Each structure stands twice: as C-alpha cells, then as structure tokens.
Amino acid sequence: MDGGWLLLAILFSSLGPGIAIFFLPEHRQGLRTALNLGGAGTKLALVGVLLAGVLRGDEYRFSLPLMPGIDLVLAADALSLLFASLSAVLWFVTTVYAIGYLEGSPRRSRFFGFFSLCVSATVGIALSGNLITFLIFYEILTLATWPLVVHRGTPAALRAGRLYLAYTLTSGLVLFTAIVWLTLLAGAEGFTPGGYLDGLAETHATTLQILFVLLMIGFGVKAALVPLHSWLPIAMVAPAPVSALLHAVAVVKAGAFGIIRVVNDVYGTELAIELGLTAGLLVVAAITIVYGSIQALRTDDLKQRLAFSTISQVSYIILGVALAGPLGIIGGLVHLVHQGITKITLFFCAGNFAETLGIHRISELDGVGRRMPLTMLAFTLGALGMIGLPPLAGFVTKWHLGLGALEAGMPWVLGVLVLSSLLNAAYFLPPVIRGWLGERREPWHEPLQAHAGPTRFETHWMLLFPVVFTAALGLLVGLFAGLGLSPLGWVSLIVRRDYSLPEFGL
Amino acid sequence: MNGLLVLFDLVLLAGIVGVAWRCLASTDLFRAVVLFITFGLLLALAWVRLEAPDIALAEAAIGAGITGALLLVTLERLRSIMAERRSGRPHTPPPDPTGPHALLRALHDPPPERRTFIPALSFALVVGGLLVTALWHQPHSTGLEPVVDAHMDISGVDHPITAVLLNFRAYDTFLELAIVLIALLGAWSLGRHDLIPARPAPGPILPGTLRLLVPVAIVTGVYVLWAGSHAPGGAFQAGAILGAAGILLVLARPRQLPMAPGVPLRLGLTAGVALFLLVGLYGLVAGHGFLGYADAWAYPLILLIEVAATLSIALALVALFVAGRPAGDDA
Amino acid sequence: MIANTLTVLLLLAGLVFFAAGTAGLLRFPDVYSRLHALTKADNVGLGLVVLGLMFQASGPADILKLLLIWLLVLAAGTTAAHMVAQRTWTHGEFESDR
C-alpha cells in the first residue's frame, strides 16, 4: 500500500473535476476552465512526483479486494509511467486546445465532463496492475468516448458513434471472454515482466494460442489493426480535440498499450515466440502499416488522411512489440510517445485550418503558409517527423525498429519500413508543398473571426499555443533522444529492467 | 390427492402452451396483448406450483400487470398515430430514421417473411439445441441451496431469496436496476411525451374507486417491501405494486399528468442505482469487495437499498407508461 | 371434517357461478349482457370461493386477508365493468383492427 494514495490522487485529479463539471451550468465558463486546467495541472505535477519516485526505485501499489481472489490493483512500473506521463502532458495541451476550440459552442459542460472521464480512464489503464483492472478502465474509456464522438449530434456524427460502439463493444466482449478465461486458468496475477504463464505452456499451449488471438482482437479494434480499423477514419467527424484524444492521447493508444502489456507482461516475449504468436502479429502489423498508408494516399480530406496515417503509424508500435527483441521493443515503445506527440500536432493543425480558415481538404491548402506561418511550420515538423526525417522523433523510432528487425533476423521488415516511409512522404509532402509554395487566388474567408473577434496572432492563442508546444516537443524528443529522461532513455530503462540487460550500445 | 395435483399441473401446462400459441399466432395485436396478460397470470400460477412464490409475485405484478399496461398503452399510441396517418393529416415531426415512426413503419410494412423465416428458424434451432445439450450434460448437483443456507447467518436477512438477491449475488440485482433505468432513458431519448390518447372516463366511479384502491396499494407495496426480509417480497414486487398505483392515477386523469418535473423526478429515478453503487463502492473501499457489506451492517444497508430501489422502480414504471421526457424539462 | 365438507360445497357452488359466467361471456350477443354474466362470476362466484377457503384459514389474519381480496376484486371489477359499459354506451361496440 506504500504510496498507493499517490496513484489514487492521480486518478482523481481528473475524475473529480470531471464529475464537478457535469453539474456546472453552461454559463460558468470561468469556473469550468479553472477546473479543467487545475485538474490537468495537478495531474501533470503528480505524475512528475511519481516519475521521480519510480526513477528512485520506489514501489507504488494500491489494491482493493474486488471479488474473492480477484483484486483491483493500481501499480506504477516504468512502462505504465511511459503511458501515464504521455497522456498527462498531452491532456494538458489538449485541454487548452479544446477550451479555445469550443469557445462559444453549446453543451460544453457535457463535453468537458466526458473529456475528463476519458482521461481518467486512460490513466487508469496506464496504472492498472492486472488484466481485470485493465479491462474495467478499458471499458469505461469506450463508454466515455462515445459522447465525445457524437458531440455535434449531426447524422454523420451519430453514424460514426454507432459504428464506434458496434466495434468497441463487440471487441470489449471478446476481450472480456478472453480475460475471464485467462483468469480462470492462471488466476488474477499482476502484470509481470517476462509473463506469468510459463507454467501453463506445456499443458495448455493451444488454449493460450486461442486466448492470444482473442486478446488481440479485443485490443486490435482500438489499436485499429486491419481489418478491425474501419471505425477510426469515420470517427474523424468528431471535433478536432476529440480526434486528438482518439488518435494520440487515449483510445488508439489504449489498444496498443494493451497489446504491449499482453505480449510483454502477461505472455512474456519468450513464450510468445515459442507459441508462434509474435510472427502472426508481425504480419498483421506489417499489413496494417502498408494498408493504412495506401488508404491515406487515396483521400483528399485532411483529417481523414491523418486518420489513415494513424492506422499505419500505430502499427509501428505493434510491429516493434512483435519483433520481440530488445531493440524492436524499444522502437515500438518509443513510438508510443513519438506517434502521440507528432499526431496530436498534426490534428491540432488540421483543426486550426478548419476553425480559422474553413479549410478541410488538402486541395484547399494552397498558400496557407503565408496566412498561418506558425501552424504551417508545426504541420511541417509533424509531417517530417512522421516520415522519419532525422533528427525528428519518427527517425528515432524507425532506426530502432530497423535495428530490431535485423536483430530478430527478419530483414523483410526493413522493406516494409522503407516502403512505408516512401508512402508517408507521398501523402504528407503534398499538403506541406501546397501550404508553402501554392498560390491562393481568392481571399480567405474566416469563420473564426465572426464570433471570436480579431486576434493578435494568426488564430486564437489557445489554438496556437498547443500546436507550437507539441511541435517543439516533437523536435526536442528527437534532438535530445540520447538524454536519460527523453522517451528513448526512459524506454531503454524499461527494456533494461524487463530483460535485465546491462547497458547496451544504441 | 397427488393424482389431482398432477392433473392440475397438466391442465396448467396445457393452458400455458395453448395461450402462448394463441398469443403468437394472433393477427390482432389487441387480442395478442390480452392473451399475453393471461399467459403471465398462468405463468405466475406455475411458479407457485414450483414453490417459487417470489418469482410468482414478480411475474404477476410485472410480467402480467405492468407489462400488460405498457403494451396496451403502446398499442393505443400506435392506433392513434396510424389513424392520423390514414386521415392524411401531415405529420408534425419530420421522419426520423431512428424514432418511433421507424418502428411504426416496420410494423406497417412487415419484412418479406420468406427471407427472415429460415434464418430465424435455424437460429432458434441452434439455440435450442445448445440449451438442450447444456442441460443434458449438466452435472448432477445439489444446487446452491446448501451454500446459501450455510451463510444465512451473515446475510443480514432471514429470507434466503432476499439474501441471494441483495447480498450474495447483489451484482445481478444492481444490473437489473440499471437496466430499468436504461430502458427509461431509452424511452426518454425518443423525445417528449405526448398525451396518452385515452379518453378520460366521465363520472365519479373511477375517481371514487381510485380513492379507495391507491391507499390500499401503497400499504400493500410497503408491506411487500418490508416482508422481503423474512418472506417472499422485495423491491421489485413492491415497486411494481406502487408503480401500478401510479399508473392508475395517470390513467384517471390523462390530460394532466401528475409527474414531478425535473430534478426531484430524476433524483427519485436514479436513487436505487445511485445508492446501490455508493454502497457497493463503500464495500470496495472498506475491503469487503465491490457490493459486499460488513456483516453487522448488512441488514440496514439492504433495507436502505431496497427502499431506494422500490422508489426508483415505481417511478420508472410510471414514467415508462407515460413515455417520453416530461414536458418543460430541458435539462 | 365439517369444515372440509363446507369448503368443498362452497367451492363447487362458486365454480358453478364461474362456469355460468364464462358461458355467458362466450354466448351472449352484446356487451351489456356479457358484462351481466361476467360480474356474477366475479362477485358471487369469487365470494363463495373465498367463503369456502375461509374454513381452511389458520387464523383471523388469514380470514381478513381473504375478505380483503374479495372486497378489492369487487371494487375493481365493478369499476371495470362500469367503464366498459360506459365506453360502449358512448362509442358503440368495440372493433378490433382486423
């Protein structure tokens, strides 16, 4: 129970304000903003404290008896902190962005209430100490996201919401079945680096294989693995902050994180390789990477292109995990952070273009770099980062994934990476080129000005600051990847601890 | 004597099957609803014969009584909408693909039977086959009765059914309460309520009878709730009786619905689920597991939950009967 | 023994009324006559059955409960019959959809 209260405090720093916001009348804008930012700031600070503690080697654990033999466990290990700090930082930024984005629109209390619930669930997923706890928060996340997806209430939004629920609830049932089955077989063990199923490998090999497939279906829907991805591009009708939440902070990441947990801390990579599970996962991830990129090329809608790009990029994480060697896992885990930072930048930019100038399509981007230079610069940084240009974040990922593929003796994965990078360039460079070099003929029509009044910057500062911040962050994590507290340094620490490896050259 | 009982059971069974078949085969919706109510009453008798008076009470009150009332009022609504449509008056609300009108259309233009018949039949056969197989392979066991009996002293109540429903398997009851609430939310999400298309009965007879019946129903409801701790009864049955009293009141004055507006109504509707959840969370934090109680507190907590649940169920049933959000409620 | 005999006799008498009421409900030509037959079954038939069962009761509480059941059915049945009759008087015979 040592320090367990810190974990609870982290959970409640967003849950408490979230519940309070539900009961706020619509016009209490100041109080709502204070609650939002206060919650986000508190969470950030608490996660910082936790980070320092875990670095010192302190144990954090909080458990409650849920049912006889099954505990509700919150625990902080290095891996959970990777996800928790990512979502805490990005949530803060997204909150600022959402306040600016939704200024003057109706039903904001409802929106921010569910928004906070989502983040609480995400942090709960990050801090879950066993599969049952993970499942509970995972399902809460599903339900709390739906009102955000349908927030606008248009027929398209409702349709996207229905599809989202159909996919995620069905996969939730599959996941539920698998986890209950696994708990019956192996008990409600906590996540253990290297897995806790070794004892069953001899007797229950086939069952374990079936369970792995079920678990992957359960997590694969949120992680948007092909062929379970169709909900994600359609859900891009949601407001831009929600897209950021779906693609970078919470939902897709929760799926990927679940896969990481299962491979690393439930089955363990050795058992997973032995049962032939990682090979299948690797193929699915490779297909998803290429398929997502090709689909992204085919659409002119900016947000939809970004959505397909997410499908492709999140599978880098899964590819890294499925490579099942230390270097591959480093590549995969670090991409959890890198993809988050980069993709949130891109979605913020897309939101800014849409809110400020009413631009939704790539073909309308001509000359936007002169009207909104900072946003366009951020977009460029994000796009180049996704393509994997050194020294940006994406390069670090792809470098380690490549090394991991060689280490695992699977050079064909390198081919997938190269092909995917080429496709990345093919779909990300056109908007960048149009933005900087294109010529705008007619004058801009400016929907934002109508209700927000003139601003000193190229758009509302609450929309601009997050973009600049995350773009700079994306640049910094790439530039300073060698430092101990960079995502890469942290991920190396995780992998060293998990594999009990000595310091190895990177 | 035993032979007579067997005869009674056989007649009862024949009645149940016969009424069920007539109900399913009826092409007249009104007749089907009436048969369904009859079916519920016969089923309640069957439960009595199976020595399950709790279920019999619930079946009579909810299955036959409240469900029957809900079906009848739905039928009446459908009739009035159809009549409106036949008379050619333009519809005020635009056709909503998910709204009640879609349901109406589905009733009006039934899908081609041949296309649905084979899948429906094969589905029924598969499910039935699975059920039979499951029953066939069921290991012979004494059931859970010894386990329940062994733990009665820590359950906080004297009636085994209540002990199971509110202590040992409180999950089930909690989720049932939640389902009642969700059903109501579903009805409310379809829009505001319109007036029940029943004509108010003139004359003093109905109000006079109600003046007599409603107090009796309230006393009976509270008694059934109270009896739950040591005899058949409990929140669902009591809620159904009180709900029936509320429905009678609504029916007696269809033009002015006696629904409490806004916040009090919402608090009442959610009281059961909310209190149950709070108690459950308290159990979790206090280390008894989710929805577990400390032994000494079991009785007062169960009573508290039952009271709140009765209130919520009664209100929810009346609100479902009225259907639709109360007017003037914009939250 | 006497109690049992009385019970059987009263129940049989009550059943006669129920049978007659059911026959009337099925055979009579219009709503009013049917109601006439039906209410006899409800009122007298049930009254006899209840009276018969009272001889089997284990105490005054049970007797009172049985009496209460009869009274409630009387009130409800009367009201229902009244409403059906009134509806028929104002709107004519009930027609079903098909």
Image (cartoon, grey):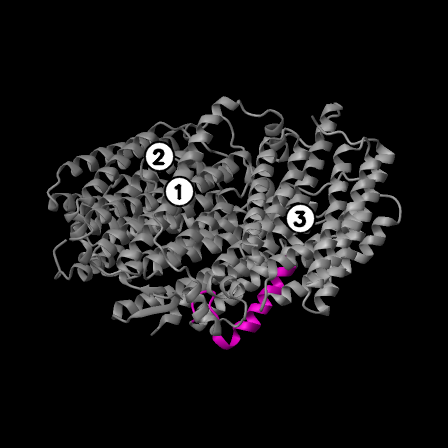
- Residue beneath label 2, please? A432
Dividing the picture into quadrants, the one containing residue C63 is bottom right
Q: Position of residue B12 (x, y in %)?
A: 58, 45
Amino acid marked by disc 3:
Gly
Q: Of helix, strand and loop, which mostly describes the magenta segment?
A: helix
Q: Secondary structure at mark 3?
A: helix
Mark 2 → mark 1, Cα distance in angstroms: 64 Å
Q: Say which of marks 2 and 1 sits in front.
A: 1
Q: Are marks 3 and 1 on the same chain?
A: yes
Mark 3 vs mark 2: give the one in front.
Answer: 3
Do the residues indicated by labels 3 and 2 lie within the same chain of the protein? no
Quarter of the image with the N terminus of chain A is bottom left
Q: CA distance from mark 3 to mark 2?
A: 68 Å
Q: Which residue is mark 1?
A: B132
Say the numbered circle drawn on residue B65: 3
Mark 3 and mark 1: Cα distance apart in space: 31 Å
Left or right of residue A420: residue B324: right
